[in-house]
Each structure stands twice: as C-alpha cells, then as structure tokens.
Amino acid sequence: MTAESKWLIDPEDILAVRFECGNCRAAVSVPIKAGISTQVNGIAAGSCRFCKTPWEITPNSAEHKALQQFAAGIEEIAATMAGRPLKVRLEVRGEGKL
C-alpha cells in the first residue's frame, strides 16, 4: 500500500513569491504585502542579479502577462477571502511517502 501526503495552503498563508535562478540557484523572495504584482515586471523581464543569466521572458509577452496575472491574483484572493466562511485552498503534493 502506498500513502501519499498533500498540503493545503490558504491564500492568506502565502507570505512571498520566490523567484529562483535555474543556473546558479540564487533567489529573491518578494513578500505579498510588498506589492508582488508591481515588482514582478522588473524581475521576470530581467536577468539573475548574481550570475546574469537572462530569464528569457520578453516584456509584454504571454508568459510575462501570465506572471503578472498570477501575482495580482494571489494578492487579490488573499485580500478578498480573508475572514470569509468559504475557504479557498491550494492543494500541493507533499514530499516523500508515508
């Protein structure tokens, strides 16, 4: 028998969005309360601040707009759902097997 663990995350529990370089693994975490939707533009359309690897996301491209919408959505859902009887949760796969 295989057991699987899953985690449920409330939007208001999301503290930050982490952007990590796939080349050198340097990362920057932007707190949701710091206005992630406004900061995602410069981060996604740029390059790694440490190794200078370009992110290869063109400004105003479909993937750039998707990142903007994702960031704005997290901010909006966390703000509008706080304290409501309906809970919206993200279900993510847990690591390892029980």
Image: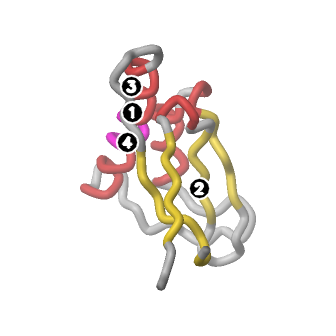
Main SS category, magenta section:
helix
Q: Find the distance from the CA under tag 4 to the CA under tag 3.
A: 12 Å
Residue type at mark 4 is Gln
- Which numbered marker is on residue 68? 4
Q: Find the distance from the CA under tag 4 to the CA under tag 2.
A: 13 Å
Q: Is residue 67 above or below residue 78?
A: below
- Which numbered marker is on residue 19? 2
Left or right of residue 33, residue 65 in this image: left
Query: Which secondary structure lies at badge 3?
Result: helix
- Which numbered marker is on residue 76? 3
Read off the magenta span.
68-73
Cβ atoms at labels 4 and 2 below 8 Å apart: no
- Give the image location of residue 82, x and y in percent: 46, 18
Cβ atoms at labels 1 and 3 below 8 Å apart: yes
* Residue highlighted by disc 1: 72
Query: Which secondary structure lies at badge 4?
Result: helix
Residue type at mark 2 is Phe
Nearer to us in this view, 93 or 38: 93
Picture residue at 61% right of the left edge, 27% below the top: 34
Q: Is residue 30 above or below residue 98?
A: above
Picture residue at 42% right of the left edge, 35% below the top: 74
